Amino acid sequence: MAKIAFIGLGNMGLPMAINLVKAGHEVNGFDLVAAAIEAAAKAGIKVMPSAAASLAGVEIAITMLPNGQLVLGVYNDILSAAAPGTLFVDSSTIDVDSARKAHELARAAGFAAVDAPVSGGVGGAAAGTLTFMAGGEDAAFARARPVLEAMGRKIVHCGGAGAGQAAKICNNMILGISMIGVCEAFVLGEKLGLSAQALYDVASTSSGQCWSLTSYCPVPGPVPASPSNNDYKPGFAAALMLKDLLLSQDAAASAGAATALGKHAAEIYREYVDAGHAGMDFSGIINAIREK
């Protein structure tokens, strides 16, 4: 078993770190939020006084932070505290450019790195069923994989530095676009006198089938586990969907890619978030579409 530092014990990071403890790993943890630290200590995580202190004697350092600026700031703080041979794994969802800069910082300091953002939400983090999309050299990925398997069900090596973030951003752009399409179809069906169940029964077994429909249906009833049956409590918050869609547009601009639907989806979610629904599940966008 490995000794691991886990920096960022929020809604996703804490259950991920807890699963590492359950798998028999020794985990040093750090977060700036007192409640997160308290919960981590109760779960068997050794709470450390700083991010740098959490690197003491560890073989792998995992970060789970809100944005690229914070990731780079933490890397600048902790790299000098790491023992030779430490592997750095960033599971945050950040922009591709920052992910590549994090790799460069680690490489310049003599360390291997992997960017490994996740899909599966808080529920997947707690259940240990996340999907990890990893970027980095083959040897670094091979070292990271057994640890990632303690937190996830599917581990995909997507390519070199930043490839994991690229895959995550592309996937979530598809998700944001498809959810809007599913919501618009249900609203149109309502106006045409079609029941939600009838539309679901047809579309879920026809060419309109997609994850946003069959696993996360935005209307109550057809999929009991979806947030629509729980007053659109997340789940995956609208603010996080907006973040990912904006990351996709930053990446598109940087790469010179045309993503007209991605751009429009970001605009729609921006309006929804700005209207005060940042904390609602992203499938709640159906209510904004219905109001229009």
Image (spheres, rainbow, N blue to C red):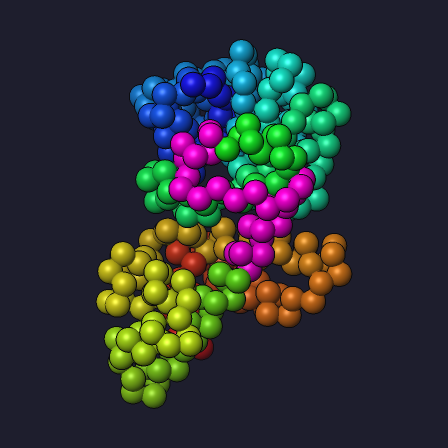
Q: Tell me where residue 182 appears, x and y as whole percent.
A: 42, 71
Quarter location, residue 123: top left
- Nearest to the observer: residue 244 or residue 267: 244
- Nearest to the observer: residue 148 or residue 91: 148
Residue positioned 35% across, 61% down in the render = 216
Q: Tell me where residue 38 appears, x and y as whole percent.
A: 36, 23
**Which residues fall within the magenta stretch?**
146-173
Q: Residue furthest top?
A: 57
Q: Is residue 167 above or below residue 157?
A: below
Residue positioned 61% across, 40% down in the render = 135
For the C terminus, give its image quadrant.
bottom left
Kindly tell me whether residue 50 is visible in this rendering: no
Q: Tell me where residue 178 appears, x and y as whole percent.
A: 48, 67
Count the labels in the image: 0
Q: Is residue 87 above or below residue 175?
A: above
For the N terminus, give its image quadrant.
top left
Q: Is residue 45 above or below residue 282?
A: above
User: Magenta includes 170?
Assistant: yes
Quarter location, residue 13: top left
Q: Tell me where residue 102 appears, x and y as whole percent.
A: 67, 33
User: Magenta includes 163?
Assistant: yes
Residue positioned 57% across, 42% down in the render = 157
